[in-house]
């Protein structure tokens, strides 16, 4: 059950959240007092409580490492920086988008999430090494789910901080209209690169730590291959995941209210134009019905809510 704290060593805590708030990590010594990612903006109060439980007062953070720009990973950045004066590090691709306050790259314009931009201080390049919790972490640029997406790999232990590139047999939603039509190809290249490492445990952006890292990476590779073979599967996955996220963000609400809100955003109409030769309303109803049938979405007096932990 999330949230949960997993102490991986004396100096490193994995903070498991849900699906609206990405997981994060706290590095307590053996290098700067650092965080990887900071949850969703509207989950900030819970983030601060969890950090305190993990042994990190927001005032003493030295560094936040950003895996990528999405709302569920950066929601606490600005607040924690204001309290601590910490440096915020990210890839050059992400840094440019943040400095330009690019609401499309950050996805909030496309998917309508809560977002707050933040100052940036340090660029992380592919193959840079960060000393955190007494381990050397290699920075790996792993685009696909997001431009400038970073993973961190510690060769000494085989631990891989995978963010949204690898979950347990799945990965973060692919959004070709924002990330480029080659997004699934890029993800495949990123996964092949990860598959070539001596990974033990994967510490994903969502879900608990994954003990059999190589198997998780192999399953993600199979999944992206299937998306490349049948592009419509990519779109089906996108519609299911975003409807679920939106119910986590906005629910409980009626199907009509959810539909009306979706129509104020570009993503569903565009996805339907590209991948489904049918009206958006039909697509919306089909996948919402499927989520209800699979028990991922519940209904109480005509109002829908997500069963996944936020
Ligand atoms: Zn993401």
Image (spheres, rainbow, N blue to C red):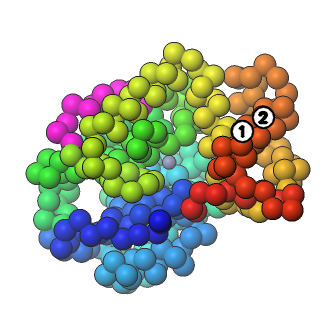
Q: Which residues are magenta?
A: 186-199
Give the vertical position of 179 relative to 48 (above or below). Answer: above
Please report the residue visible at 30 percent of the width from the left and 73 percent of the height from the top: 62
User: Gap between marks 1 and 2, in whole Å?
Assistant: 6 Å
Density class for disc 1 (Cα within 10 Å; few <14, some 14-19, many ≥20) is some
Q: How many numbered circles does the render carry?
A: 2
- The image position of residue 226, as x and y in percent, is 49, 21
Give the vertical position of 209 relative to 92 (above or below). Answer: below
- The image position of residue 18, as x and y in percent, is 51, 61
Res 260 seen here? yes
- The image position of residue 13, as x and y in percent, is 29, 69
Note whether ligand 1 is within 8 Å of mark 1: no
Density class for disc 2 (Cα within 10 Å; few <14, some 14-19, many ≥20) is few
Q: In the rendered structure, find residue 290 and report the number of the disc placed on it.
A: 1
Res 92 seen here? no
SS class, disc 1: helix
- The image position of residue 180, as x and y in percent, is 54, 29
Examine the image and state in which quarter residue 11 appears.
Answer: bottom left
Magenta span has 194?
Answer: yes
Magenta span has 236?
Answer: no
Task: Work out which quarter of the rendered image holds the C terminus and state it.
Answer: bottom right
Q: Main secondary structure of the magenta part?
A: helix
142 on left or right of 74: left
Q: In the rendered structure, find residue 248 and report the number of the disc placed on it.
A: none
207 on left or right of 162: right
Q: Residue furthest left?
A: 156
Please report the residue visible at 72 percent of the width from the left and 39 percent of the height from the top: 290
- The answer to whether mark 1 and mark 2 are in CB contact below 8 A is yes
Q: In the rendered structure, find residue 286 and report the number of the disc placed on it.
A: 2
Give the vertical position of 229 relative to 224 (above or below). Answer: above
SS class, disc 2: helix
């Amino acid at each position: 059950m999330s949230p949960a704290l997993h102490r991986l060593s004396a100096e490193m805590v994995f903070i498991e959240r849900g699906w609206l708030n990405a997981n994060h990590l706290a590095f307590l010594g053996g290098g700067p007092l650092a965080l990887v990612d900071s949850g969703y903006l509207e989950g900030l109060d819970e983030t601060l409580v969890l950090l305190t439980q993990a042994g990190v007062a927001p005032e003493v953070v030295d560094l936040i490492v950003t895996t990528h720009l999405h709302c569920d990973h950066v929601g606490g950045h600005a607040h924690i920086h204001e309290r601590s004066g910490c440096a915020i590090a990210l890839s050059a691709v992400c840094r440019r988008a943040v400095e330009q306050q690019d609401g499309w790259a950050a996805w909030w314009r496309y998917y309508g999430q809560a977002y707050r931009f933040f100052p940036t201080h340090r660029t992380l390049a592919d193959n840079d090494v960060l000393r955190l919790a007494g381990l050397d972490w290699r920075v790996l640029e792993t685009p696909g789910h997001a431009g400038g997406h970073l993973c961190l790999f510690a060769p000494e232990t085989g631990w891989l901080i995978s963010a949204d590139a690898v979950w347990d047999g799945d990965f973060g939603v692919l959004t070709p209209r924002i990330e480029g039509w080659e997004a699934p190809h890029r993800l495949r290249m990123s996964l092949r690169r990860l598959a070539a490492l001596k990974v033990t445990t994967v510490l994903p952006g969502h879900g608990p730590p994954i003990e059999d890292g190589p198997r998780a990476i192999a399953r993600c590779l199979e999944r992206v291959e299937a998306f490349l073979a049948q592009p419509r599967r990519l779109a089906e996955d996108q519609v299911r995941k975003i409807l679920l996220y939106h119910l986590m963000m906005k629910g409980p609400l009626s199907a009509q209210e959810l539909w009306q809100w979706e129509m104020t955003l570009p993503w569903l109409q565009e996805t339907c134009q590209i991948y489904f030769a049918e009206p958006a309303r039909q697509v919306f109803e089909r996948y919402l019905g499927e989520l209800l049938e699979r028990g991922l979405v519940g209904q109480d007096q005509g109002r829908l809510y997500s069963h996944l932990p936020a």
